[in-house]
Image (cartoon, grey):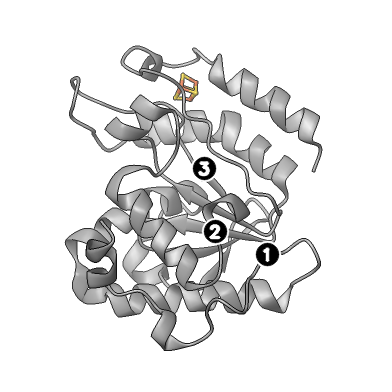
Amino acid sequence: MSEDALVQLTNEIKACVACQLKENRTQVVPGVYGQSNGICFVGEAPGYYEDQKGLPFVGRSGKLLDNMLEGIGLERDDVSILNVIKCRPTTNERGNRTPTESELRFCGDRWLFKQLKLLNPRLIVTLGGIALKFFIPKAKVTKYVGKQHNTNYGLGIFVTYHPAYILRNYNIMETYNEHFEEIKKTLNSTTNETTHIHNTQSKSKSKQKSLSDFFKSD
Ligand code: SF4
């Protein structure tokens, strides 16, 4: 990965005014890049807190994602976390809205692919149905979830739920844990020296996260 190229690309993204979503944003949220090129999570778009802080997946969803990573021996700094869209879709100051398909396509085609090309991750994990739709337009998350799929872009993706969905549907927390175990297994099967899977931290079910762990640490 060329760090200079990544810095340059990130600066271009931060300065982007190519679509109407620039109007209501506080700032662009380009994403964060991991210390290894192992894994890249892709969500849909920044929400209120992300827009305020300029970082992806902050607030309760971000905290759950951090917990899930910890459960498989990873830290946030180890992984790249991006959104398809870099500016918050909103109808008013506080309300988030689901991005339209054309917004998704416009921003994602413009920036996300360039980021992925430079990062060259060994595994892309989509978080939620909107991010999945960007890679496989007609896909429904319920049918694709928990597995790896090829896309028309020559990229393989592993599909899982958005953490915000788990916070509203904690009955599927065990399934979410299984997805993250699968992610770990996939990464370990292609591990090289740049990967930071801390095997001492978690291999067993006992380290897997329950939603009550999450709320306790909240
Ligand atoms: S949403 Fe994407 S394309 Fe639109 S202004 Fe923001 S960075 Fe540019």
Pick whichever of labels 3 and 1 is earlier in the sequence: 3
Q: Secondary structure at mark 2?
A: loop
Amino acid type of the residue tagged 3 in the rendering: Leu
Q: Which residue is mark 2?
A: 75
Q: Which is closer to the viewer, label 3 or label 2?
A: 2
x and y percentages locating residue 6 in the rendered image: 72, 32
Pick whichever of labels 3 and 2 is earlier in the sequence: 2
In the shown orientation, is residue 101 left or right of residue 15? left
Ligand 1 within 8 Å of disc 2? The answer is: no
3D distance between C-alphas at marks 3 and 2? 15 Å
Q: Which residue is mark 1?
A: 196
Pick whichever of labels 1 and 2 is earlier in the sequence: 2
In the shown orientation, is residue 121 left or right of residue 125? right
Badge 2, how many Cα within 10 Å: few under 14, some, many 20+? some
Amino acid type of the residue tagged 2 in the rendering: Glu
Dividing the image into 4 quarters, which one contains the N terminus? top right
Q: Secondary structure at mark 3?
A: strand
